[in-house]
Image (cartoon, rainbow, N blue to C red):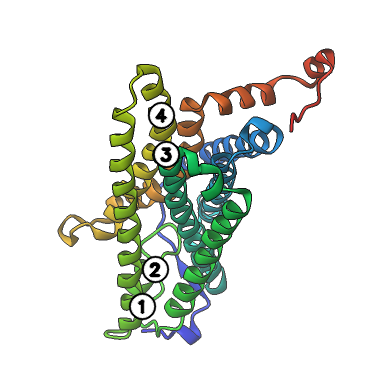
């Protein structure tokens, strides 16, 4: 038995016991994190440099890439360090910081995805009001609200979770610090307040999900009324990347938390945690760049050599 006041560190779940597999996990995570950093960094540079992407969707995509970078940088480096050094430990305050930033970036990302759905709804269903409803000031306010919501949400969860008395040891059943894993270490009947906050959070997420579903029903109805096939194709190409990202986000995280206890196992929990914490931030840039022609053109410019730009007499940034 231990008390939270005397805890100085937690033990994270190891990916493997064999040294060869630990090194394999290290190199795999290194490749994933470098790919995510490169892809999101290219999108940030492209949106900042290309004036064709200075649109509300480009602005929100820039913010989404920032949240993806934050998610990767919060969980993966510590997992890589533990695999490389053959250790499982994370300090008490390091765990609190990791939980805070992970919840912060995940909450901000879901808020941004909801806002981006509203952007697509206005663009397709109310195009004449697009400039009024999604002006630069309105976009800045909505993005600020998404980040502020994530900050307050993560602050509440972190303060609530780490104020609980922990008396079930210090071994977490995850490769990073998350709320359910810490709640399992709390004393019996001591986590009612945090469960109440979690239920409130689930209600908010469900409300956002209903809004997204309702918006896409209206979007698809409007798209199907477009007379030209080219117009329908263009509208679908704008919406499908966002819908794919939302589906990836929604299908991994909730299942990891709401799956039946009868099918729970350490290996399954570890796999699901990787799916919802590492895979979406890595795939989001690829999903958006595949279907967005303007983004592909901007990325193509970013990948040209500086020598070619000088020959053409143009600057690196076209904003």
Q: Which mark is residue 194?
A: 1
Q: Secondary structure at mark 2?
A: helix
Q: CA distance from mark 2 to mark 1?
A: 9 Å
- Residue 230 in picture, x, y percent from top left: 40, 18
- Residue 5, relative to residue 69: is it above or below? below
Q: CA distance from mark 1 to mark 3?
A: 32 Å
Is 225 placed left or right of 151 in the picture?
left
Q: CA distance from mark 2 to mark 4?
A: 39 Å
Q: Say which of marks 2 and 3 sits in front.
A: 3
Q: Secondary structure at mark 4?
A: helix
Does residue 21 appear in this view?
A: no
Q: Quadrant of residue 38?
A: top right
Q: Are marks 2 and 1 in contact (CB under 8 Å)?
A: yes
Residue behind mark 3:
242
Q: Say which of marks 2 and 4 sits in front.
A: 4
Q: Residue at x 52, y 38 (%)?
A: 27
Q: Say which of marks 2 and 1 sits in front.
A: 1
Q: Are marks 1 and 3 in contact (CB under 8 Å)?
A: no
Q: Which mark is residue 179?
A: 2
Instruction: Decide which of tag 2 and tag 3 comes sooner along the chain.
Output: 2
Q: Say which of marks 1 and 3 sits in front.
A: 3
- Residue 177, relative to residue 188: is it above or below? above
Instruction: Decide which of tag 1 and tag 4 comes sooner along the chain.
Output: 1
Q: CA distance from mark 3 to mark 4?
A: 12 Å
- Residue 22, relative to residue 52: is it above or below? below
């Amino acid at each position: 038995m231990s008390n939270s006041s005397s805890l100085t560190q937690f033990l994270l779940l190891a990916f493997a016991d064999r040294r060869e597999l630990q090194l394999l996990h290290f190199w795999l995570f290194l490749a994933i994190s470098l790919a995510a950093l490169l892809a999101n960094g290219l999108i940030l540079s492209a949106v900042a440099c290309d004036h064709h992407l200075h649109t509300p969707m480009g602005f929100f995509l820039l913010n989404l890439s920032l949240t993806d970078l934050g998610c990767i940088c919060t969980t993966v480096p510590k997992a890589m360090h533990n695999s490389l050094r053959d250790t499982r430990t994370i300090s008490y305050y390091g765990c609190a910081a990791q939980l805070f930033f992970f919840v912060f970036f995940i909450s901000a990302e879901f808020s941004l995805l909801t806002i981006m759905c509203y952007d697509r709804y206005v663009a397709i269903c109310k195009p004449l009001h697009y400039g009024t409803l999604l002006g630069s000031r309105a976009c800045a306010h909505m993005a600020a609200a998404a980040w502020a919501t994530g900050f307050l949400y993560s602050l509440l969860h972190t303060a609530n979770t780490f104020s609980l008395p922990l008396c079930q040891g210090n071994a977490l059943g995850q490769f990073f610090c998350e709320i359910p894993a810490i709640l399992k270490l709390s004393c019996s009947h001591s986590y009612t307040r945090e469960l109440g906050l979690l239920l409130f959070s689930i209600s908010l997420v469900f409300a956002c999900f209903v809004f997204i579903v309702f918006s896409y029903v209206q979007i698809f109805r409007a798209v199907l009324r477009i007379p030209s096939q080219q117009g329908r194709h263009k509208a679908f190409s704008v919406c499908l990347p966002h819908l794919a990202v939302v589906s990836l986000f929604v299908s991994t995280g909730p299942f990891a938390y709401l799956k039946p206890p009868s099918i729970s196992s350490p290996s399954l929990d570890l796999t699901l945690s990787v799916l919802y914490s590492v895979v979406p931030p890595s795939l989001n840039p690829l999903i958006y760049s595949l279907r967005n022609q303007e983004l592909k053109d901007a990325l193509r410019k970013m990948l040209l050599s500086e020598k070619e730009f000088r020959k053409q007499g143009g600057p690196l940034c076209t904003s």
